[in-house]
Image: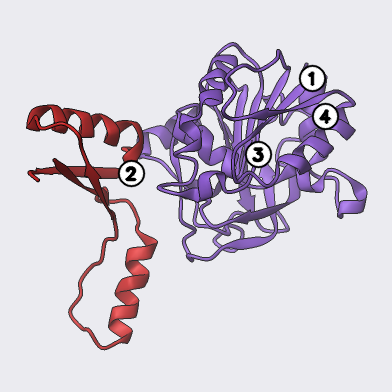
Chain colours: A red, B purple
């Protein structure tokens, strides 16, 4: 199975990189971008075929390493194949 | 006094730290490889600057899971003074010895220059040889030194006198001109509750000898030596 993990900054945490991207988009003439938040996308190939076990395992990975929950949220999508 | 400098793949201030501490304390300095959880008994542990694991994922995140860091945590809990400098500060927040996190600098640039900071508390082994409110000059060299924490933790740091250093201007004023990286509350360094763990972005080991251009970092190591 595959796990797709999105790690994003929590609301209220300043994102200087997102701000820079927003400014750059404005400079390129892309108007109407009210906000940009930048995060990470991590794709994992898992040996297990048990969806619940995969979710529990990846959740533990997020807490232990993949995300820093002081400033980041994460979401996990488990997909077959 | 015996000290240990933790060495990760990508550490690059480990030798500087060793030389500075050897000269100041006159004692042995062990270079402790991160993969080796067995560390000799030491009186002082330094988590040095650099780019451990290439700063992959988040600065300090992978290093914080190294075998030796569990041992460093145990020693810190037992009262051994531990300092994390620059990348070492990032590692100490990731491993949970200090609260908060170091984010990308507000201006998104890597900054390498001398800054000024005020000594906000003399109540620790690291700061006891400075004067309260003293302005000192120390170099910084980082891309991710923008300290951030939630409001409750910030209040606890303030109320418990755990902010060791704040960025200031050369004449000691606190304003945006003195803060190089956007750190919340101008924080340059913080202590843990027991006051034996210090994390700081500036590099005291780089200004601890006259030929290097200044001595403002020296008192930090002398304070630890005197407390040992």
Which of the two discs, 4 and 1, sits closer to the camera? 1
Identity of the residue drawn at 22% across and 43% down: A45
Q: Which residue is mark 2?
A: A71
Identity of the residue drawn at 9% across and 46% down: A81
**Residue A4 visible at all:** yes
Find residue B192 and report its image quarter.
top right
Dot 4 and dot 1 residues touching (CB under 8 Å): no
Q: Is residue B180 above or below residue B226?
A: below
Q: Which mark is residue B222?
A: 4
Q: Is residue B226 above or below residue B158?
A: above
Dot 4 and dot 2 residues touching (CB under 8 Å): no
Numbered disc 3: what chain? B
The quadrant of the image that shows the N terminus of chain B is top right
Numbered disc 1: what chain? B
Q: Which residue is mark 3?
A: B48
Mark 3–mark 1 distance (CA, rounded to whole Å) = 16 Å
Q: Is residue B11 left or right of residue A32?
A: right
Which of the two discs, 4 and 3, sits closer to the camera? 3
Numbered disc 4: what chain? B
Identify the element where label 4 is drawn: helix
Identify the element where label 3 is drawn: loop
In the rendered image, residue B63, in percent from the top left (x then y), is placed at 51, 36
Which of the two discs, 2 and 1, sits closer to the camera? 1
């Amino acid at each position: 199975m595959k796990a797709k993990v999105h790690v994003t900054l929590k609301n209220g945490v300043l994102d200087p990189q997102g701000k820079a991207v927003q400014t750059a988009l404005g400079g390129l003439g892309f108007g109407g971008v009210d906000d940009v938040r930048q995060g990470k996308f991590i794709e994992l190939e898992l040996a297990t075929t048990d969806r619940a076990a995969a979710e529990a395992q990846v959740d533990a990975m997020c807490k232990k390493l993949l995300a820093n929950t002081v400033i980041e949220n994460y979401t996990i999508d488990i997909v077959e194949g | 006094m015996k000290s240990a400098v933790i060495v990760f793949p990508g550490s690059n201030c480990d030798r500087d730290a060793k030389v500075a501490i050897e000269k100041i304390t006159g004692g042995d300095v062990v270079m402790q490889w991160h993969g080796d959880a067995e560390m000799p008994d030491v009186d002082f542990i330094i988590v040095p600057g650099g780019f451990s694991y290439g700063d992959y994922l988040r600065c300090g995140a992978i290093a914080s899971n190294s075998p030796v860091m569990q041992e460093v945590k145990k020693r810190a809990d037992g009262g051994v003074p531990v300092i994390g400098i620059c990348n070492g500060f990032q590692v100490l927040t990731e491993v949970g010895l200090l609260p908060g996190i170091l984010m990308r600098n507000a201006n998104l640039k890597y900054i390498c220059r001398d800054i000024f900071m005020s000594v906000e508390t003399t109540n620790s082994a690291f700061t006891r040889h400075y004067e309260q409110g003293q302005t000192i000059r120390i170099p910084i060299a980082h891309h991710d030194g923008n300290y951030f924490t939630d409001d409750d933790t910030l209040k606890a740091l303030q109320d418990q006198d755990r902010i060791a250093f704040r960025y200031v201007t050369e004449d000691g004023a606190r304003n945006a001109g003195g803060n190089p990286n956007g750190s919340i509350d101008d924080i340059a360094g913080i202590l843990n509750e027991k006051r034996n763990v210090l994390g700081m972005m500036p590099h005291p080991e780089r200004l601890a000898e006259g030929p290097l251009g200044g001595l403002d970092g020296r008192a930090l190591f002398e304070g630890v030596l005197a407390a040992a």
